[in-house]
Image (tube, helix red, strand yellow):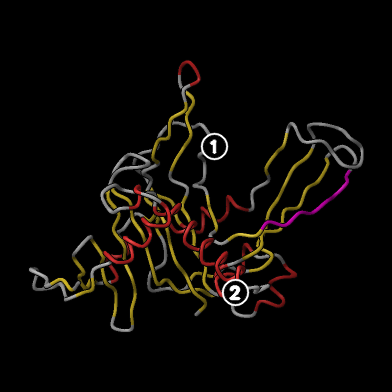
Amino acid sequence: MVYEPEDRDAVQHVSPMHFTQAYAAIYGGDYDGEASQDAHETLNQTLNRLKDEERALGNTSTMVESVFQGIVFNHFTCKRCGHKSNMTDDFMELGVTMPGLPSGSAKSRGGHVTLAQCFDTFREQEEFPDRKCRDCSAIGGVSKVSSLGHVPSHLAVQIRRWQQVVGRRGRVTFQKIDTKVNFPVQEVFDLSPWVSDAAAASAGDLNYELYGVVEHHGSGLNDGHYIAYVKRDDGWWEMDDESTTRVKPGSVGRANPYLLFYRKG
């Protein structure tokens, strides 16, 4: 199905109806296009499904992994005996937290931070009061620092905008963090400050360029409205339901991102 735009700045485009119908057939009625779904969850499910389909064909590695998969190095240190240990985690999309917003904090409105500041929280030291040291068995003295051990050619970044808040009687709710995150649109985003030394030596160019943004409007985890911005060879386009409109980079930069998509320049 092709839509004819009413807006003179919009263009003719193909409806995503067939894709959403196929998606609903796989994941159920919640994805029938009638209700809003979390964009990050949908991205995660889609990438994992594509990966699983390739694995079912007997492939030991998949195209999805070669494009999107990265590795996080987690470095643990016991402050009591000095023992060090390392663990790795794979990721298809990298989640980053806004600075100064520990878990359970109050809902944040107003103000702004930069994407680089969000990435800085990724490398901040984290304490584990209940973790046992593998060497001396002491509990409560273990800390962790993380770095990127492998960076993919295409980096999907999730801005963690949902805070879990425990209210009266133990009721758990999710509140949205509305803080504006400023991110590079026309400039490159240099990942080198957050990449491990060993990975940086073999990674080559660590400059990334933006090619996609997803913005959430609304206050609820499972409601509201999503708008996407996509960069093509002919510039930036805004995808808003059945409207596809050419926009300037400045309009993209004014978005308050939930998901960001970067690729090596």
Gap between marks 2 and 1 measured at Cα? 33 Å
The image shows residue 254, relative to residue 150, as above or below, that is above
Is residue 39 or residue 114 the one in the foreground?
Answer: 39
- x and y percentages locating residue 96 in the rendered image: 53, 52
| 222 in magenta | no
Instruction: Give, as a three-letter code, the residue at label 1.
Output: Pro
Q: What stretch is highlighted in magenta?
A: 82-89
Q: Which mark is residue 102?
A: 1
Is residue 236 or residue 60 the one in the foreground?
Answer: 60
| Callout 2: SS | helix
Disc 1 residue crowd, few under 14, some 14–19, many 20+, Cα 10 Å = few
Q: In which quarter of the image is residue 23?
A: bottom left
Q: In which quarter of the image is residue 17?
A: bottom left
The residue positioned 29% from the left and 79% from the top of the image is 235
Please identify the quadrant where the N terminus is shown. Answer: bottom left
Instruction: Give, as a three-letter code, the residue at label 2.
Output: Ser
Is residue 106 or residue 229 the one in the foreground?
Answer: 229
User: Which badge, 2 or 1, is on the more N-terminal residue?
Assistant: 2
